[in-house]
Image: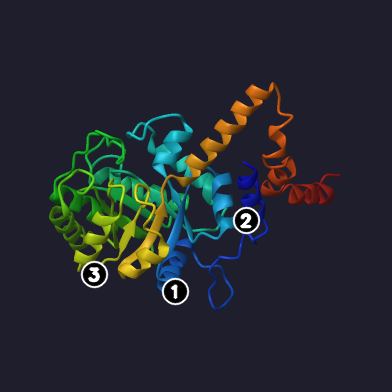
């Protein structure tokens, strides 16, 4: 835990706003436009999952290009399985809270779109207004089961029906800068590379801006093979949860991967930190030892912008 604290302290010294994109006139770009500009400039975007405004602030300070409003992480925060148990309202409430504390672009994980194409139409409008810069919609049936669980039910939607969802999303978005990312779970469902490629091509035909391809193998062989076989015009998105050896340099070398989403690092890091601290408090009969290894309360005050609040009190409370 002492090592974790040293890393956190080092990250906190970086400017919160160092990665904000600005227009030539000096105005801050809309986040959706910023996401596309960063992709063009950097080649590969690194996106960190967030489940709270605090985790979003920490991701921004660490230097990530954007945030993943993760359904898995939010479900875990509620102590629930990632099986379409949380409502769109619950996810939107957290997304709005995150958007209010960061200027990083947010990629929203909207699972299957909360229903059919009509539900997708409603969702796209809501997520754009809430502050998302992109959405990822997956081709599973509703309700879904999280991808990486052993023996999970992985049922895919008919290609034509999912095309309708993508077309509905494209037709509904208020700005063409807003990214609609189609996620194929064909590899997760054990359907093989050819079906994954066929589905991805169909989704691009329907208008998808990017293709997210996912795998539950513990090595990146399926993803790298898919990438080499992919000749479509849309760039790829990967989520290397099960195959962390596929790092940024290796992904960049594939040539068509433009976004890496670290899908569950935040909640896992938070959970292990709390597990260790809570166990030590119980074992020690108090916090007399553990308090040296956790963040000082002054660092929490900094993340809460306490100095700004104190300055406002001095200025305005009379």
Callout 2 environment at 10 Å: few (<14), some (14 to 19), or many (20+)? some
Q: Which residue is under mark 1?
A: 41
Residues at circles 1 and 2 in contact by the CB criterion of under 8 Å: no
Q: Is residue 207 visible?
A: no
Mark 1 and mark 3: Cα distance apart in space: 18 Å
State left or right for residue 115 relative to residue 239: left
Q: Residues within 10 Å of mark 3 (few under 14, many from 20)?
A: few
Does residue 218 appear in this view?
A: yes
Viewport quadrant of the C terminus: top right
* Left or right: residue 314 compared with residue 36: right
Reading the image, the residue beneath label 3 is 233
First in sequence, mark 2 or 3: give its number: 2
Q: Earlier in the sequence, mark 1 or mark 2?
A: 2
Q: Is residue 285 above or below residue 119?
A: above
Residue nearest the viewer, comparing 87 with 263: 263
Instruction: Give the residue at mark 2.
Output: 11
């Amino acid at each position: 835990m002492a090592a974790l604290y040293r890393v956190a302290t080092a990250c906190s010294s970086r400017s919160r706003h160092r990665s904000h994109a600005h227009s030539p006139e000096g105005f801050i770009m809309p986040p959706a436009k910023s996401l596309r500009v960063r992709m063009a400039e950097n080649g590969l975007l690194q996106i960190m999952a967030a489940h709270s405004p605090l985790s979003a602030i920490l991701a921004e300070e660490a230097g990530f290009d954007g945030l993943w409003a993760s359904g898995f992480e939010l479900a875990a925060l509620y102590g629930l399985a990632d099986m379409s148990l949380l409502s769109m309202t619950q996810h939107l409430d957290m997304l709005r809270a995150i958007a209010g504390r960061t200027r990083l672009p947010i990629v929203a994980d909207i699972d299957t779109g909360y229903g059919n194409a009509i539900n997708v139409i409603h969702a796209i409008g809501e997520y754009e207004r809430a502050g998302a810069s992109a959405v990822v919609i997956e081709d599973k049936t509703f309700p879904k089961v999280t991808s990486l669980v052993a023996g999970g039910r992985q049922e895919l939607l008919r290609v034509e029906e999912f095309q309708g969802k993508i077309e509905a999303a494209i037709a509904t978005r208020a700005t063409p800068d807003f990214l609609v990312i189609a996620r194929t779970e064909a590899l997760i469902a054990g359907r093989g590379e050819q079906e994954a490629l066929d589905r991805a091509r169909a989704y691009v035909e329907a208008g998808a801006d990017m293709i997210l391809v996912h795998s539950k193998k513990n090595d990146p062989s399926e993803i790298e093979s898919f990438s080499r076989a992919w000749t479509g015009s849309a760039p790829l998105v990967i989520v290397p949860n099960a195959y962390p050896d596929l790092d940024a340099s290796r992904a960049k070398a594939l040539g068509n991967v433009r976004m890496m989403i670290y899908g569950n690092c935040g909640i896992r890091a938070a959970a292990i930190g709390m597990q260790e601290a809570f166990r030590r408090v119980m074992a020690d009969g108090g916090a007399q030892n553990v308090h040296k290894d956790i963040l000082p309360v002054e660092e929490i005050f900094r993340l809460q912008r306490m100095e700004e609040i104190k300055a406002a009190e001095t200025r305005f409370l009379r």
